[in-house]
C-alpha cells in the first residue's frame, strides 16, 4: 500500500517532516509500504493578509484536486495498487 500525502498551508514542501517520520516508522517495522508526497505551492500565510492567502490557497487546492485525480489516483487504480490519501486541512476556530 502507498500512502499519498497532500500537505496544507505553508508554501511548497518537497520533503515534509510527516513523510520522513512515517517512512522511518515503516522502515523500523520492516513494512514495505511507502509514503509519497504531492508537492504543490499552497501559499505561505501572510498574517496581515490571511483571508486573501486563504482564498488563493483554496483556488490552488481546487486546481490541484483535478491533477491529483488524473495523475495520481487514476494511475494507482489502473495498476490495481492500493493507496490511501492523507491530507491536512485547517479548520477555522471562532470564539
Image: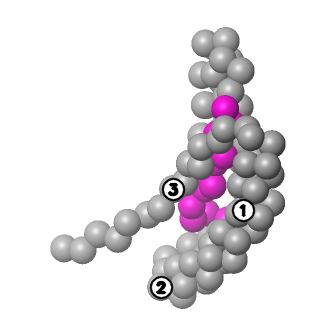
Question: Looking at the picture, how far across and down is residue 86, in whole percent?
Answer: 56, 48
Q: Earlier in the sequence, mark 2 or mark 1?
A: 2
Q: Residue at x 60, y 22 (%)?
A: 25
Which residue is nearer to you in this view: 19 or 87?
87
- Asked whether the residues under the numbered discs 3 and 2 touch, taking CB atoms below 8 Å apart as contact, a structural biologist would say no
As drawn, which residue projects farthest toward the left? 95
Q: Decide: is 55 above or below 90.
A: below
Callout 2 secondary element: helix
- Residue bearing mark 1: 68
Indicate which disc, 3 or 1, sits on the residue closer to the N terminus. Answer: 1
Which segment did they paint magenta?
1-11
- State the CA–CA distance, disc 3 to disc 1: 15 Å
Residue 65, visible in the rendered structure: yes
**N-term-proximal mark, 3 vs 2:** 2
Residue 40 in sight: no
Give the Cα separation between the discs numbered 2 and 1: 25 Å
Of tags 2 and 1, which is closer to the observer? 1
Residue 94 found in image quarter = bottom left
In percent of width and height, residue 76 lies at 76, 46
Of circles 3 and 2, the one toward us is 3
Residue 36 higher or lower than 89, as above or below = above
Which quadrant of the rendered structure holds the N terminus? top right
Q: Nearer the viewer, mark 3 or mark 1?
A: 1
**Disc 2 to disc 1: CB gap under 8 Å:** no
Does 68 lie within the magenta span? no
Residue at position x 57%, y 78% from top?
A: 58
Q: Which mark is residue 88?
A: 3
8 or 85, which is in the foreground?
85
Residue at x 73% of width, y 38% of height: 81
Q: Dot 2: few (<14), some (14–19), or many (≥20) neighbours within 10 Å?
A: few
- Residue, disc 2: 51
Amino acid at each position: 500500500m502507498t500512502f499519498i500525502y497532500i500537505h496544507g498551508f505553508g508554501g511548497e514542501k518537497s520533503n515534509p517532516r510527516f513523510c520522513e517520520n512515517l517512512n522511518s516508522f515503516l522502515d523500523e517495522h520492516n513494512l514495505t509500504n511507502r509514503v509519497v508526497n504531492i508537492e504543490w505551492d499552497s501559499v505561505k500565510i501572510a498574517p496581515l493578509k490571511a483571508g486573501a492567502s486563504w482564498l488563493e490557497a483554496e483556488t490552488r487546492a481546487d486546481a490541484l484536486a483535478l491533477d491529483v485525480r488524473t495523475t495520481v489516483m487514476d494511475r494507482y487504480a489502473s495498476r490495481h495498487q492500493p493507496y490511501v490519501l492523507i491530507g491536512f486541512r485547517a479548520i477555522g476556530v471562532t470564539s
